[in-house]
Image (cartoon, rainbow, N blue to C red):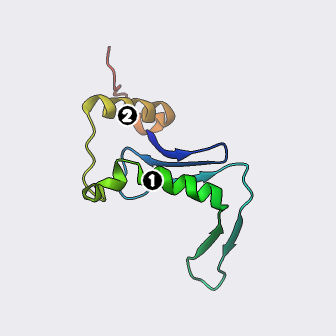
Amino acid sequence: MKKTLASSDTFHFYERNVDNTKVYLEFEELEIDLSVKRNGRSIIKMAIPIEEWRSITAGWSTSDWSKDVTRDYSPIKISKEQFDIFLSKFQNQHPEVFMDGHDLNPE
């Protein structure tokens, strides 16, 4: 349930359909400088190559979300079909949660 906002061979900038509170950025096969403060503070600093940053921000600026700030932290709208697909995948990955014998698809 990822929706790509921007991507290349080295990064994937995306949102998740069920989360209006975050965007996600993954780097692969890209050399970046990463520093983590060790004084107990939660600070992470990354040096991102400018070409990648331009692609990331261009993707964001053309996304539906960037043009609609009312979407930030708004309730998630998901259809019954989307929920059933999610629940079925979750059940397949975590069968122990459904140990009471109730099947999602009693056909």
Residues packed near mark 2 inside 10 Å, few (<14), some (14 to 19) or many (20 plus): few
Q: In this view of the protein, which residue sits in the foreground, 77 or 54?
A: 54
Q: Where residue 66 sits in the image (x, y, percent)?
A: 36, 55
Q: Residue at x 68, y 73 (%)?
A: 35
Residues at marks 1 and 2, CA–CA distance in whole angstroms: 29 Å
Please give the label number shown on residue 68: none
Q: Residue at x 31, y 59 (%)?
A: 72
Whether the residues at callouts 1 and 2 have beta carbons within 8 Å, the answer is no
Tell me the quarter of the image containing the N terminus: top left
Count the numbered circles shown: 2
Q: Which mark is first along the chain, 2 or 1?
A: 1
Q: In this view of the protein, which residue sits in the foreground, 54 or 8?
A: 54
Q: In this view of the protein, which residue sits in the foreground, 97 or 56?
A: 56
In which quadrant of the rendered view does residue 78 lie?
A: top left
Q: Secondary structure at mark 1?
A: helix
Residue 20 lies left or right of residue 74; in this view the side is: right
Q: Where residue 94 sits in the image (x, y, percent)?
A: 48, 37
Residues packed near mark 1 inside 10 Å, few (<14), some (14 to 19) or many (20 plus): some
Check the image and report above or below for 17 versus 82: below
Residue 86 lies left or right of residue 70; in this view the side is: right
Q: Secondary structure at mark 2?
A: helix
Check the image and name the residue furthest to the top: 107
Check the image and report above or below for 36 versus 6: below
Q: Which circle, 1 or 2, is nearer the viewer?
A: 1
Q: Where residue 51 sits in the image (x, y, percent)?
A: 64, 56
Q: Where residue 53 sits in the image (x, y, percent)?
A: 58, 59
Residue type indicated by callout 1: Trp
Tell me the quarter of the image containing the C terminus: top left
Task: Look at mark 1 in the image and give the residue it sits on.
Answer: 60
Task: Look at mark 2 in the image and give the residue it sits on.
Answer: 87
Residue type indicated by callout 2: Leu
